[in-house]
Image: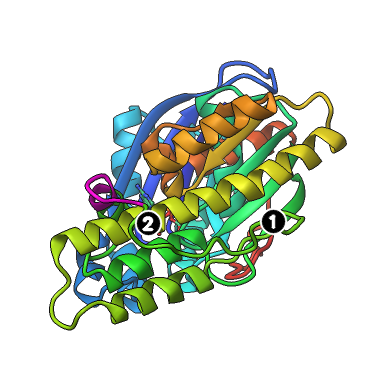
Amino acid sequence: MIVLGIETSCDETAASVIRVNDSDLNSGGEILSDVVLSQIEAHRPFGGIVPEVAARAHLESADLVVEQAMSEAGLRFDQLDAVAATGGPGLIGGVIVGVMTAKAIAVAHNLPFIAVNHLEGHALTARLTDNVAFPYLLLLVSGGHSQLLIVHGVGTYTRLGTTIDDAVGEAFDKSAKLLGLGYPGGPPLEAAAKLGDAKRFPLPRPLRGKPGCHFSFSGLKAAVKRTIDALPPGDLLPQDVCDMAASFQAAVADVMAERTRNALREFRTQCPDGTTLVVAGGVAANQALRAKLEKLVKAEGFILAAPPLKHCTDNGAMIAWAGIERLRLGQTDSLEFAPRPRWPL
Ligand code: KG4
Ligand code: ZN
């Protein structure tokens, strides 16, 4: 079974071809190609993603990225078993480009079309990269989402927690902006934090000690702003930036670990045979967060699975893989499918 996956919902134009050799529902796949074209340079001058710029960039490069993925895989379109594309949630202009590209290939070569929920792509990636079996607990942390979900099977999810305001990646990006660290903020903030003192600025731990698994980050971001504003006027000193980055990152890691601990306990009650916490999404690239989660799972008697960094951030392989998971269950979509800017799992 060979599937092409196309991802265009945010600021990466990506395509990938994946093959699975048997019908074992728990076997991983072979990534034949995995092309990711980042638009970051186009958005950097604006300090964030501009939807119109993103849509235009996807339109300009989707064909080329798909062509490259097919040629690296050494395949023609008629050798595929299906074409999958992110059908949402995401920026509507980009999603339309990916969905139309996939539908055109499907029509031209008489292939099934599969509309993949972007979150499901993130949710299922650990089964491709780490062969994780159902059920597992997923901590999905990206620029647009912060969620704790029990993944019972393909298409069967129980949401235990979500953010009541900002997504965690958004909090990283906005705090990094306040610190003059550029966009996207996660990687430079993490680098600055390595040189900083996490104890210098006491920042809040929103929702700490409260039952449940929801997140909140807007108060933390506001505290970063207040603390910066209270420093002596003038440019932030490099050490101030590093100390603030370290203090912010420690607060986020504390909050994530505590909310995830509550979710692991709920997961154990609902699924006594579950063993694994999977962490996915761009923020899962953060080493300090990963280290904290490693400690947590050990203390709670679980194991941690984290896809390699390049499969934590947006990519085409996660969409091709989710397509394979759906195709194996005989689930395909009609060409009437309409892109969904909002599409909760
Ligand atoms: O999953 P992703 O590539 O895109 C979606 O939002 O769907 O996640 C991007 C987010 C951005 O907010 C970025 O700042 C954050 O992930 N990020 C990080 C790190 N690398 C990327 N946040 C913290 N530490 C990192 N090392
Ligand atoms: Zn994503």
Where's residue 15, x and y in %?
39, 45
Which residue lies at the image location 56% right of the left edge and 50% below the top edge? 256
Image mark for residue 209 = 1
- Number of numbered discs: 2
Q: Nearer the viewer, residue 76 or 216?
A: 216
Dot 2 corresponds to which residue?
Answer: 247
Q: Nearer the viewer, residue 264 or 329?
A: 264
Q: Amino acid at mark 2?
A: Ser
Magenta stretch holds residue 111: no
Question: Tag 2, which secondary structure?
Answer: helix
Q: Is residue 35 left or right of residue 242?
A: right
Residue 10, visible in the rendered structure: no
Does label 2 point to a residue whose CB lies under 8 Å from ligand 1? no
Where's residue 110, x and y in %?
57, 45
Residue 293, visible in the rendered structure: yes
Q: Quadrant of the C terminus?
A: bottom right
- Badge 1: how crowded within 10 Å, few (<14), some, or many (20+)? few
Q: Quadrant of residue 182?
A: bottom left
Q: Is residue 56 left or right of residue 234?
A: right
What is the span of residues highlighted in magenta in the rendered image? 191-198
- Badge 2: how crowded within 10 Å, few (<14), some, or many (20+)? many
